[in-house]
Image (cartoon, rainbow, N blue to C red):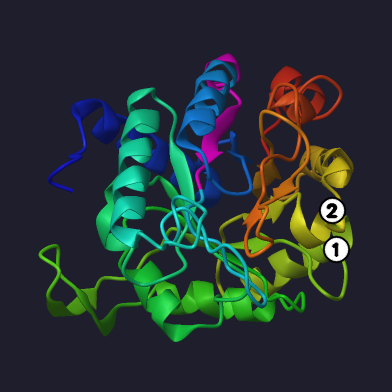
C-alpha cells in the first residue's frame, strides 16, 4: 500500500461509485449496476486495454447504468487449477504472491485513475487488507457464501457486498449471509502493519443477494426472482437483487448471456426489484489452456463492445428510453 498509495483520482472514483451502487441496491436510484469484464485478470496490459474501452461505455450510459469493471484476482476452484493473479501472477507455478499483490494493487490504482470503478471477489481473508480501498463492489462467491469468516469479513467492509446463492442453487444461504453481515462481529484478522489483530466490525447494511444459478438450474426467471424477493421481504430486507448472467444462469455458455439479460429487462419493465447484473466479457471471445494444463487462462467471454448486450433492443428500450423507475 505504501508503494502504490491511492491517488486523489482513485479516492474520488471509489467514493462516487460506492455511493452510486449503494443507492441502486437500496432502490433510491433508478439506475442499474452493471459489473462487466473478464472472468479473471491474467494480463495487466490487456486488462488496461479493456478498461479504456469500458470507460467510453461507462460515460456513454452514465445516466442509466453504474458500470464497474470486473477485476478478479482470485479464482475459486472446485478441484485444482490456476488460482488467480495474486496466487500465481506469472502463470508458471512459481506462486510469487508478493509480486501478485503488487501487480494487482498497481492495476487497480491505474484503472481507478481512469475513472472506472473496480469490482472484485474476495476469496481469502488477507488479500482484502491490501486492496479493499481500491474496490467499489465485492462478491462473495457461491462456494464461500456459507462461510462464517467471509460473512464476518463482509460485515467490516465499506462497500456494497453481493452474496451469491450456493452452488446447489439454494438462495436461503445467501439471505442468511446478508442478514449475518449486516450485524456487528468480532473476529481475528490482520492489521495494516501485517500483525495479528482482533477486529470489531460495525456491520454492513449494503449487502445483497446475487442470483447466479446452480446445479438445480438457472434462477434468473421471473418466478425465481420473485421467490427470492419474497424471502427477502419475509426477512425484513428491502434491497434489490442482482442477477449474474453467466455461470449457472447461462448454463456455462457465454452466448446465452444476452438471453438472460433480455429476461431481466422484461422483469425490470414489469417493476421487478432487480438492482444489477453481472456479465462476463473480454477483448476477444474464448479461452485457452496453459501448455502445462495445470492452470486455466480464461482469456475472454464476449467480444465486441463490452456493453453491446445491454443496449439497443435490451436495456436501452425499457430503461434508457422510457426512464423506467424499477422500484415503483
Q: Mark 1, residues whose alpha carbon is within 10 Å: few (<14), some, or many (≥20)?
A: many
Circle nearer the N terminus (1, 2): 1
Residue 176: x and y in percent read: 56, 80
Q: With 61 as the anchor, is 307 left or right in this view?
A: right
Q: Could you tell me how far apart the alpha carbons at marks 1 and 2 are, in whole angstroms? A: 7 Å
Q: Is residue 70 magenta?
A: yes
Question: Which SS class for mark 1?
Answer: loop
Residue 247: x and y in percent read: 76, 58
The residue sitting at 50% across, 44% down in the picture is 71
Q: Which residue is mark 1?
A: 218
Question: Which SS class for mark 2?
Answer: helix
**Residue 294 vertical position relative to residue 170 in the rendered view, above or below:** above
Q: With 264 as the anchor, is 324 left or right in this view?
A: left
Q: Which residues are magenta?
A: 58-71
Q: Relative to the observer, which residue lies in front, 206 or 325?
A: 206
Q: Name which quarter of the figure residue 113 lies in.
A: top left
Residue 211 seen anywhere in this rendered image of the structure: yes
Picture mark count: 2
Q: Nearer the viewer, mark 1 or mark 2?
A: 2
**Residue 28 vertical position relative to residue 10 in the rendered view, above or below:** below
The residue sitting at 31% across, 35% down in the picture is 109
Residue that extends furthest to the front in the rendered view of this protein: 292
Residue 132 seen anywhere in this rendered image of the structure: no
The residue sitting at 34% across, 30% down in the picture is 110
The residue sitting at 77% across, 35% down in the picture is 285
Q: Which residue is mark 2?
A: 250
Residue 228: x and y in percent read: 72, 68
Q: Quadrant of the C terminus?
A: top right
Residue 195: x and y in percent read: 12, 75
Amino acid at each position: 500500500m505504501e508503494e502504490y498509495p491511492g491517488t486523489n483520482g482513485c479516492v474520488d472514483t471509489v467514493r462516487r461509485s460506492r455511493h452510486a451502487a449503494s443507492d441502486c441496491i437500496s432502490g433510491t436510484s433508478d439506475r442499474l449496476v452493471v459489473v462487466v469484464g473478464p472472468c479473471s485478470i491474467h494480463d495487466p496490459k490487456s486488462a488496461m486495454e479493456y478498461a479504456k474501452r469500458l470507460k467510453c461505455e461507462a460515460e456513454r450510459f452514465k445516466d442509466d447504468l453504474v458500470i464497474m469493471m470486473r477485476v478478479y484476482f482470485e479464482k475459486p476452484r472446485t478441484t485444482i487449477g490456476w488460482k488467480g493473479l495474486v496466487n500465481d501472477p506469472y502463470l508458471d507455478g512459481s506462486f510469487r504472491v508478493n509480486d501478485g499483490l503488487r501487480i494487482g494493487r498497481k492495476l487497480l490504482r491505474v484503472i481507478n485513475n481512469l475513472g472506472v470503478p473496480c469490482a472484485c471477489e474476495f476469496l481469502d481473508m488477507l488479500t482484502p487488507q491490501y486492496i479493499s480501498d481500491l474496490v467499489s463492489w465485492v462478491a462473495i462467491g457461491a462456494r464461500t457464501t456459507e462461510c462464517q469468516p467471509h460473512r464476518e469479513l463482509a460485515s467490516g467492509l465499506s462497500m456494497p457486498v453481493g452474496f451469491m446463492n450456493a452452488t446447489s442453487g439454494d438462495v436461503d444461504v445467501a439471505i442468511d449471509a446478508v442478514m449475518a453481515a449486516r450485524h456487528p462481529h468480532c473476529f481475528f484478522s490482520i492489521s495494516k502493519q501485517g500483525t495479528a489483530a482482533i477486529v470489531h466490525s460495525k456491520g454492513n447494511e449494503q449487502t445483497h443477494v446475487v442470483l447466479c444459478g446452480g446445479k438445480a438450474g438457472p434462477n434468473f426467471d421471473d418466478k425465481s426472482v420473485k421467490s427470492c424477493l419474497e424471502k427477502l421481504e419475509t426477512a425484513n430486507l428491502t434491497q434489490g437483487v442482482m442477477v449474474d448472467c453467466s455461470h449457472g444462469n447461462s448454463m456455462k455458455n457465454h452466448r446465452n448471456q444476452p438471453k438472460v439479460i433480455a429476461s431481466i429487462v422484461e422483469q425490470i419493465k414489469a417493476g421487478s426489484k432487480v438492482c444489477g447484473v453481472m456479465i462476463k466479457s473480454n477483448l476477444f471471445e474464448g479461452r485457452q489452456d496453459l501448455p502445462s494444463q495445470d492452470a486455466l487462462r480464461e482469456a475472454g467471454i464476449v467480444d465486441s463492445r463490452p456493453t453491446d448486450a445491454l443496449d439497443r433492443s435490451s436495456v436501452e428500450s425499457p430503461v434508457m428510453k422510457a426512464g423506467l423507475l424499477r422500484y415503483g
